[in-house]
Amino acid sequence: MKLLKSVAIPVIGLSAVALLAACSGGSGESAGSSSSPSSPNTSQAQTPSTATPTIASQEIIATNLDAPWGIAFLPDGSALMTERDTGVINRITSEPGGEATVKRVGEVSSFHTGGEGGLLGIAIAPGQDPAEAFVYYTTRQDNRIASMRWNGSKLAAPSPILTGIPSAQIHNGGRLAFGPDGSLYAGTGDAGDPDLAQDKSSLGGKILRITTSGKPAADNPFGDSPVFSLGHRNVQGLAFDSQGRLWNSEFGANRHDELNQVNAGSNYGWPIHEGIANDPKYADPYVEWPTSEASPSGLAIIDDWAYMAALRGKRLWQVGVGNPQPVGPNELLVGEYGRLRTPAVALDGSLWVTTSNTDGRANPADDDDKIIRLTLTSR
């Protein structure tokens, strides 16, 4: 157990970013060359229903974490957090301005780490007294989703509910989220084989929608299949807005990373297209970025403002998603904490953000990795 004192950090403002055409080279979580964010959509940006939120305060609430990846909140306001490379699941309890407690409450012993794989996403069953958590992890054969019984203080060993998701050193996806409909959504990657993203019979390069027993949701778009959408390269973030619409963030290859509004049965173009293509056969991203400014991982939405963590970009992107055209994007925390992995909305409305500096692609500080709590306010 670790007892960690919160550290107050001066307020950080935000700046709007000009949107210019871009072309860069690279692949994976860290690749891409320097360029400016681009999206023709934002030239017609509308004003959202609420003023642009700013960061009112920051606190570092946990340090010395080992490649934190997924965060899910319990009804009491504490959170369960996965560590990618250890297979450990910690419970983090924190109050604003107070001490944070990090306590190990479970583990996945059968996971396989290496490259971008390991113990990845976590989601907690909805309700005031959840009895299960769900995790996404890599084995030597595949990626899989498993249920773990929760008794209020400990997690039982994982029981797989969906197996056979393609795995590799790269592009394992891994994010989990429960939707307003009660279904469990999972973002997967193409496992380094782009053709899988267009293959409806493969679980790779997709967003999946399943029940808590691992079965396809009854009204999925492709019959008795867990596939909800296809044509994705490497889905890293999933979140829902106030209208119940699903959004995802994902890695591009050589040019553009993406924030997408996701609809049932839609095809997001990979590997035929990357970024905005204006091809009626495929869904265009809502916003695109050059890979050097993003390499997006997790995604969270508060009051129809999306917050997308950037790994190589080392910042938190903010986009208003409440209207047909995006507002922003705005950049927060630029270079303040290094690589950012996962934003998650706490029950008190604050935003927790994890760093990812111990994942083998950065030079970590002595107290990495961290969780930062942001209190947001509208101006």
Image (cartoon, rainbow, N blue to C red):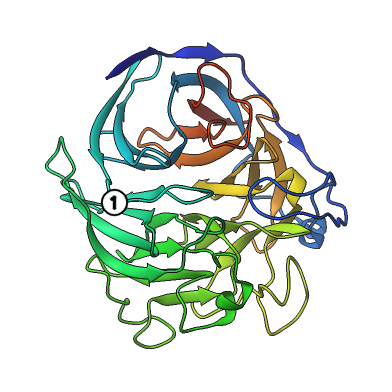
User: What's the residue at 49%, 48% (across, down)?
Assistant: 114
Q: Nearer the viewer, residue 125 or 54?
A: 125
Q: Position of residue 270 (x, y in %)?
A: 66, 72
Q: Is residue 377 above or below residue 318?
A: above
Q: Secondary structure at mark 1?
A: loop
Q: Residue at 54% of width from left, 65% of height from top? A: 191
Pinpoint residue 330: horizontal percent, then vertical percent: 71, 40
| Foreground of the two, 328 or 271 | 271
The image quarter containing residue 6 is: top left
- Front residue of 346 and 340: 340
Residue 224 shows up from this direction: yes
Q: Whole-percent x and y of residue 82?
A: 37, 40
The N terminus - image quarter? top left
The outermost residue toward the left is 151
Above-or-below relation of 49 to 335 = below
Q: Amino acid at mark 1?
A: Ser
Question: Which of the 4 image quarters holds residue 26?
Answer: bottom right
The tally of labels here is: 1
Whether residue 303 is visible here, answered yes or no, is no
Q: Quadrant of the C terminus?
A: top right
The residue that appears at 27% across and 46% down in the rendered structure is 109
Q: Position of residue 221 (x, y in %)?
A: 44, 84
Q: Residue furthest front?
A: 140
* Residue density around tag 1, few if under 14, some if 14–19, many if 20 or more, within 10 Å: some
Q: Where is mark 1, residue-wise?
A: 110
Is residue 299 shown left or right of residue 268? Answer: left
Q: Is residue 98 above or below residue 207?
A: above
Q: Quadrant of residue 219?
A: bottom left
